[in-house]
Structures are given as C-alpha cells and as structure tokens.
Amino acid sequence: MKFCYFRNLPISLLCMLILVLIIFQVRPAGSRIYIDINSPLQEKIPIAVPAFRYEGGELANKPLAKNMADILSNALSFSGFFQLLDPAVFLEDPDRMGIEKEEIKFSEWRFLGADLLVRASYLVQGERFELKINLFDVIHQKLLLSRTYNSSVISVRDTILRFADELMLELTGELGIFHTKLAFVGDATGKKEIYLADFDGSNIRQLTNDRSMNLSPNWSADGKQISFVGYKKGNPDIYTIDPVSKAMERISMRPGLNIAPAYHPNGGKLAATLSFTGNPELYLLDLRGQILKQLTLSWSIDVSSSWSPDGSKLAYVSNRAGKPQIYLLDVDKETTTRLTFEGDYNTSPAWSPRGDRILYSGLHNGKFNIFMISPDGRELSQLTGGEGNNEDPCWSPDGRLVLFQSDRNGTPTLWVMQANGTDQRRLRLALGGSHAEPDWSPRLTRTAP
Amino acid sequence: MQKSTAWILGALMLAMLLVLGVSCAKKTVTMEAEPTEEEMAVEGAAAQQAAEDAAARREAELAKMSDAERQRHEAAMMAEEARMRAFVEENIHFDFDKYDLKPKAMMSLDEKAAFLREHPEVRVLVEGHCDDRGTNEYNLALGDRRANSAKNYLVRSGVADSRITTISYGEEQPLCMEQAESCWWKNRRAQFQVR
C-alpha cells in the first residue's frame, strides 16, 4: 500500500507522500494550503540508473545499453524530481549485476547515497527488443515497480519514456510528462515558422513552411490540434493544424487582427482577439471561426487569454486602465476583475493546470521577468530576475515545470525551470535562430512521427 | 510590392503630366481592393508600360517647350515627386505603449491627407509597428491600434475610408535592432504603402 510504504521513508520520499495527498485530496476552491506544492520539491531524490544489462542477441546492439540508461536518466533529471547519481562512482560492472531483488547489493547503493535504483536488462532479436525494468527502494530494499516491454527496436526511446511515465505515476500518483510536445516559433529559416519538439527539446520538426510569418501556437486540450496566427494571406489570420498530418485550415480571416487563439479546455471552441470593429476585443469562436460570443467590449486592447482549467474563467491582458494589466473574466457571469496591480506592464497570463496559480511576464526596472500570482491576487512571487528578459511563460501539463523565453544569453531561446523558479536551464534545441512563444502540449495519446 | 509600388509611382507621374496639360490622353490605373498576384503582375506590367509611354511623351513635350517653361515644369515635377516619396518614406512615431498621435505625427498625416485628396486613385496600406519590448501578442494589438489611429485621422481629414486598409506587424518587422531608445523610437511607427 503506497501510503503505508511511504510513511517510513526519509524526508525526500515523505515529500512524495505530501504530493500524493495533495493530488488526491479534494479541496474547496480558493483553499490556500495547496500552494506549498513547490517547497517540498526542493529536495531532489537521489536515484541510480546504471547501464542496462545486455542479455544477448545481436552484439551490434550492445551500445544501446548506455543509450537506454541515458534516455531514462535525462528524462528523470528533466522532471526536476531527481538527482541522478554519477555512473562513474558505481561499484559494479552493470553487465555483471543482476536486476532482480535478490541479486541487488542494496548496502552498496545505500553507501553511494541512492534512495532509488533502476535496474534493467534487454534482449534484441532482429527488429524486436525485450526490455525488463525494475525500480527499487534502496533504503527498504523493496521492489516498487516492475515492467516488461516487447517492442520494435526503433521505438526504444518511446518505450523507455513509457517506463519513466509509469515511474512517476508510481511515485507521485500522476503520470510523467515524457509523452508531451512543445510547440514554439523559430526563425532558423529567416522567417518565423511553427516548430514542434519533444518535451526535452529533442526531435525537432518544422510544422509550417510558408515563409510568411507564423506566431502564437496553442495546443488544443486533446493534443490533436494546434491553432496559430499566420500571415500567409497577407493578414494576421487564425489557422488550425493537425500536428501529425499537417492538415491546415484558416478559420478566422476578418479584416484587422485575428490573433492570440486559446483553445477552451473542454474543446469545441477557442478564445481569440479580433479587431474587425476597429478595436481589439476578445471573442469566443467555434472551431470553424464563427463567433459564438463577444467577451469584451471596451475602448482598450483586450488580448492574450488563458483559460482556467475548468473553462469558466479567462485570464487576459487589457490596457483599459491605461497600461497593460492582467484581468480575470468570468465568462458565464460576465464579471471582470483586475488581477495585477504591481508594475506598469504585465502581459502573457498562463493559468496553471491545477487552477491555483497564474504566471505572467511583467516589466520592472526595464526588464521583463516572470511572476506568479494566485487567482485571488495574493501570493505574488517573482520567478526570474537579474538575467535578461524573461517572457511568455507556459506550464508543463503536470504543473511542475515552467517553459519560457529568455534572452539572457543574447538571442531569445527557450528555458525551463521548476514552478518555484529554481533549476533554470536552457532547453537543448538543435535549431539555430531565436525561439519564442512556447506552448506545452497536454499528454499525448498518439505521438507524431 | 516595392517594385509594383515603383511602377504605381510611375503611373502617378503620368497622371501628373495629365494635370499639367502636357497630354490629352486620359489613362488611370484602377486598383482592386484585394488584387491577386496575377492581377498585380498584370497591373505592374500595365503600369510599367504606362510609365514608359509617359517618359517618352515627356521627352517629346519637353523638346517643344521654351527653357523657362521647361524649368518651371521640371521644378513642379520634382516637387510632386518629393511629396510622393515623403508619403511613402515618412513614418509617424509613437511613445512606448501608446497609440495616440503626437503633434508631429498629425502634421505628417495632414500632408499625407492632402496628397491623398489630390490623388483619389491612390489606395493606402497603413502598417502598425512596435518596438520589441513587451509580448508579441500585445504588440500585435498595439500595432493594430497605431495603424487605426493613423487611418482614422486620414478619414477625418476627408480621405474615403474604403481607400485605406491597415495591418499590424507588432514587433515583427523592426527597422533597427539595437536595445536603445533611439532605436525603439524608430520601430514604434506607422508606415505607409501605396497600393
């Protein structure tokens, strides 16, 4: 039983327990205790992932052993939960170590400081490979998770990431984010186009290629569509595209702006800013671009909306008080409240997957930085600072990571941090030029090639 | 677009020759609201032909004129040409995060409006631009408001609404790339294209 098991573990695993409790506990809206979700995560769990043991088959496949361990290590490290032990300090040759509980020398792993250990072995037969992976609790000498996979050699990475997702489910009660994708704008070709990458920036794929200008990619809640703004026809119009087939449709092409699309979490509609009346206002559109409802009516700019996870509210940017600030609109009640009061220029709101936080970028002392606030306007905190301009934040689907754009190294590129602002690192993207306007997909059931 | 603009300017030169009474043949270039690429190519070719014809006719007419007439004529031509260039090349500028027109911008727009009233065949595309501070989406909206500020002023100055279209490029087409106010100022602009 998961809870009983965690009770006797050291602090790092206790944190997991807290997290599990938080995830499973149903709380009334607006409750406060939730917030500390980030602080327990500061202590990372030490985990050892030795090279996978090669059980025979074609010898040419032996180098996979290290690659597979690296894929898993990199994914776990990316999640921000784990501290990966350096394989150079491992005491045994991974090829000689067994992978079953009786064969593991737990005291040695304990000595190295590992709380968790992954042991795996694999076999390659032609195009097929068989992988067995075990996850152990070193301290209590227990097998926590055991999985066997039988798949094609070309899907090695996908298989290992599946295990990583299940490992996260076992430890936190929620699947990992290892089957997600990032959409962003890149100008490597000299023109702004939409690109896709895996969660960690690998496997880059160019989605649009019309050499006009494509901006503001936004994933639908089911991950099957991306909406974006394209200038292909000489005006900023809203398009939708299937990220797998690349089938594209222009859905809103009214005179003036058709920008900032934001899919509703329940699907079937999106919010967008249109300016055919002469002023940029927010509208609710169906997926064919027909207006279902006008959401704002003012003399000011209303743009950049982000839905609350239940789809009842929108955080958006308005300059109705003279400067851009974040406002919240209750779509059914048609009531608007102002959220941000600190600073003269706050934009790009991003509502957290759990609904308890809103990220935005704000201008202070001439630099843009990322801030976090709760929807009731309290608990404002600054997540970035002192390093260039940091803008356009978005959440990982588990709400633990924040992806954003930063020019701290010169050209704007994508960076990732924990949701408490720690662990800021540049995303490794094998793509030149600048990278901007990231949007993180939900967990994907089908993966793009 | 630049090229076709050049030919349209050429066609305008022809129109001016007509105004000055040098020729009696009336030829105007009409423009569709949304010309396709093919139509633009055809228009471009027609404008090119017209400009070449005009140049040839101008040579012939100039040959017949007295020196004084020729000088007066050339001075008038150059002045008109300068007005056209100013129309396209002179941007109007805005303060950071603002779209209200500054006095200097209004003066510039007064000249543009006068030019447009005298040349009813000209259609205009007003582009709104921003500096690169702030978010992309907000700047797209800001650029839209800037373009519309300029358009509305021209309309109030007697230019038909239907002759002016707008587009916002937000922060996407800077004229200047440095991180300094002198550069940001250049980028915060409305820019005018003759269509």
Image: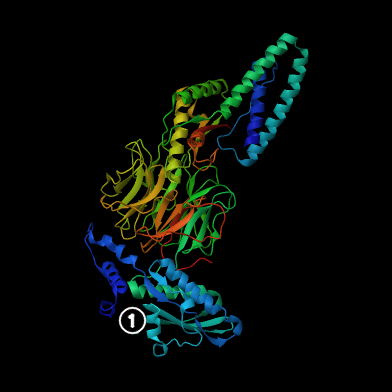
Please give the residue where the numbered disc 1 appears in the rendered image: A139
In the picture as drawn, the residue positioned furthest to the bottom comes out as A102
> Would you identify the image quadrant in which residue B156 lies?
top left
- Three-letter code, disc 1: Ile
> Would you identify the image quadrant in which residue B19 lies?
top right
In the image, A28 versus B117, the foreground residue is A28
In the image, A392 versus B138, the foreground residue is A392
Q: Position of residue B94 (x, y in %)?
A: 45, 32
Q: Is residue A135 above or below residue B36?
A: below
Q: Residues within 10 Å of mark 1 (few under 14, many from 20)?
A: some
| The C terminus of chain A: image quadrant | bottom right
Helix, strand or loop at label 1? It is: loop
In the image, B13 versus B85, the foreground residue is B85
In the image, A262 versus A140, the foreground residue is A140
Q: Position of residue A386 (x, y in %)?
A: 41, 50
Regarding residue A152, the answer to whether it shows in the image is: no
| The N terminus of chain A: image quadrant | bottom left
Residue under the point 55% across and 75% down: A154
Regarding residue B57, the answer to whether it shows in the image is: yes
Residue under the point 26% across and 62% down: A34
Q: Is residue A205 above or below residue A261?
A: below
Q: Position of residue A21 (x, y in %)?
A: 26, 70
